[in-house]
């Protein structure tokens, strides 16, 4: 009995079969059509378990046991419960934030119908907060939430909602440890609570790039089995002032302009990105400036590798976050006119771009892939963009270069001083400012804005540093797909 239960309650591979118990329910008789004669004193017991399906999807299945002998039945139930309680990596108490306005505005419904029943089945208790305004979750986490009560935080929403959770948790952790976020050289203290993402947004790139699919049930099951995946976070500063954290894309030029335009069309839902993407492509603005960066020379991989960041990938201990003066000598500089400057700390894969902006980027290696797309013809830029959606190499083009870096800075060519910046900060954002060289014409504006994980940063001049493994998610990274998927889950008796 003990041996069978051990197999049932551990992630295991046997004849390519994968089953992990998530919970046990002693069902009331009315739920089950008995196969065997049962009496009210001996109801059947149902064990729920996780099963792999196609394309990284996980699903929940049940097996119902009947046992005519009361004592043996009780022994099974007790032992399964003990085994499940002994799994310390599994969360028991979670704090859940739901954004009711993310994506197609289905957050509450997705949580109630698909996720809450699974958490209940796995005996996870939850405190649920439906947010009432933007930054509600961030501010609650930063100051009020009694974090000691919980084993993790779950966000139901998109990348913007995830970003709120990251800001709340990281800021709280730094404050409690006396770390000054305004200093770009400061080494930040990692957060101890894991974060779960139930995808209910428009892009959901963090979920897609860490699980392999945007599916609320799959994500909930990864939380239940207690997966853990460390993740890098970039800090963004301007003039020794902390601006924001970023865990997926920091994009200036094309992706900054797409976002600025799409924010005015939120009413369109996820389709706003198609509309603004097409419009921004047609405007074909370029931006002049200098990008200086500190290459990551002490790591094995490069952004042009054919290998991908997959579950179980172990990063070698590296220098992670390093202070500027120590490495000042190794900095490189690229000046020019750019259609896009993108920094991808992870692949940024999402349904729109299944391999992502930087397919070989790693989730937790302390680096970000800096992609510089120089001014080129519309036709060439379109070829580059379309390669985000195909298998072809988007970096194999003369006007594109990519560097794996630990830190970088961007200074726009005409950047003057902070009085201009203050104007932007105070809400009078100069997105429509025209080129200073030709004040009367309507050619490319002098500045774009940064797209920071889907939030607009009004500052153009920024300094960015990667903080290796600052947060942890309730995922295990994308699992390698079996060669013959049909053989991965043969019918397998428990
Ligand atoms: N109750 C609320 N009312 C209005 N805005 C909210 C509320 N709760 C959170 N927000 C904000 O909504 C914004 C968008 O949310 P979210 O990321 O969940 O969806 P999305 O933008 O559609 O998806 P994605 O970020 O994946 O593209 C976030 O910036 C978040 O701060
Ligand atoms: C002519 C048009 C060609 C279109 C080419 C399509 C290329 C798609 C690449 C998509 C990359 C998304 C990267 C993820 C960024 C997220 O942090 C952010 C927040 O959710 N999403 C966007 O900014 C949303 C960005 C959406 C951009 C379209
Ligand atoms: Ca990385």
Image (tube, rainbow, N blue to C red):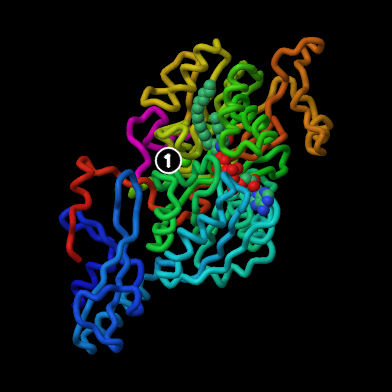
Q: How many marks?
A: 1
Q: Quadrant of residue 407?
A: top right
- Quadrant of the rendering where the C terminus is positioned: bottom left
Q: Is mark 1 within 8 Å of ligand 3?
A: yes
Q: Residue at x 63, y 22 (%)?
A: 290
Quadrant in which residue 374 is drawn: top right
Task: Tell me which residue sits at (27%, 78%) in the image.
Answer: 44
Instruction: Say which residue label 1 marks.
Output: 362
Would residue 292 be visible to someone looking at this image? no
Say whether residue 402 is left or right of residue 324: left
Q: Which residues are magenta?
A: 295-310
Q: Is residue 369 above or below residue 228?
A: above
Main secondary structure along the magenta-highlighted residues: loop
Height in image: 106 above or below 277?
Answer: below
In this view, the residue in front, 193 or 17, is 17
- Say which residue appears at 78% left-offset and 22% top-offset: 433
Closer-to-camera residue (41/451): 41
Q: Is residue 41 magenta?
A: no
Residue at (61, 53) in percent of width and height: 99
Considering the image in quadrants, where does the N terminus appear? bottom left
Q: Position of residue 310 (x, y in %)?
A: 35, 44
Residue 63 x, y percent position in the rendering: 26, 68
Instruction: Please say if 414 is above or below 186.
Output: above
């Amino acid at each position: 009995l003990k041996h069978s239960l051990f197999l049932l309650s551990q992630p295991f591979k046997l004849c390519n079969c994968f089953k992990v118990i998530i919970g046990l329910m002693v069902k009331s008789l009315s739920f089950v059509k008995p196969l065997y004669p049962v009496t009210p004193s001996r109801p059947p017991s149902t064990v729920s378990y996780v099963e792999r399906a196609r394309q990284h999807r996980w699903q929940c299945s049940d097996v119902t046991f009947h046992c005519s002998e009361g004592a043996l039945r009780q022994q099974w139930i007790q032992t399964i419960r003990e085994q499940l309680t002994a799994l310390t990596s599994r969360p028991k108490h979670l704090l859940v934030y739901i954004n009711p306005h993310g994506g197609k505005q289905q957050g509450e419904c997705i949580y109630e119908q698909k996720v809450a029943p699974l958490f209940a089945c796995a005996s996870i208790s939850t405190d649920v907060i439906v947010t009432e305004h933007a930054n509600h979750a961030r501010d609650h986490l930063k100051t009020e939430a009694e974090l000691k009560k919980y084993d993790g935080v779950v966000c139901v929403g998109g990348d913007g909602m995830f970003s709120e959770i990251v800001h709340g948790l990281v800021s709280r952790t730094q404050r409690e440890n006396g770390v000054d976020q305004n200093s770009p050289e400061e080494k930040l203290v990692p957060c101890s609570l894991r974060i779960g993402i139930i995808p209910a947004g428009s892009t959901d790139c963090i979920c897609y790039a860490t699980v392999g699919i945007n599916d609320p049930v799959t994500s909930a099951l990864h939380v239940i089995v207690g997966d853990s995946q460390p993740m890098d976070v970039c800090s963004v500063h301007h003039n020794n002032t902390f601006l924001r954290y970023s865990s997926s894309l920091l994009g200036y030029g094309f992706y900054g302009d797409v976002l600025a335009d799409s924010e005015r069309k939120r009413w369109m839902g996820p389709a706003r990105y198609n509309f603004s993407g097409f419009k921004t492509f047609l405007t074909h603005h370029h931006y002049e400036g200098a990008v200086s960066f500190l290459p990551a020379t002490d790591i094995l991989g490069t952004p042009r590798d054919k290998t991908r960041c997959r579950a179980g990938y172990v990063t070698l201990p590296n220098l992670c976050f390093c202070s500027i003066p120590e490495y000042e000598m190794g900095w490189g500089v690229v000046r020019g006119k750019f259609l896009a400057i993108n920094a991808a700390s992870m692949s940024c894969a999402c349904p729109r771009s299944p391999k992502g902006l930087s397919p070989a980027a790693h989730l937790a290696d302390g680096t970000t892939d800096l992609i510089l797309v120089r001014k080129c013809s519309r036709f060439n830029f379109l070829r580059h963009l379309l390669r985000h959606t195909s298998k072809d190499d988007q970096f194999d083009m003369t006007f594109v270069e990519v560097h794996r870096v630990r830190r970088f800075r961007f200074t726009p060519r005409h950047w003057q001083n902070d009085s201009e910046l203050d104007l932007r900060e105070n809400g009078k954002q100069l997105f429509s400012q025209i080129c200073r060289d030709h004040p009367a014409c309507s050619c490319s504006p002098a500045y774009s804005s940064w797209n920071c994980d889907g939030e607009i940063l009004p500052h153009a001049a920024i300094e960015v540093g990667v903080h290796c493994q600052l947060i942890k998610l309730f995922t295990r990274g994308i699992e390698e797909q079996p060669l013959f998927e049909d053989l991965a889950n043969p019918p397998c008796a428990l």
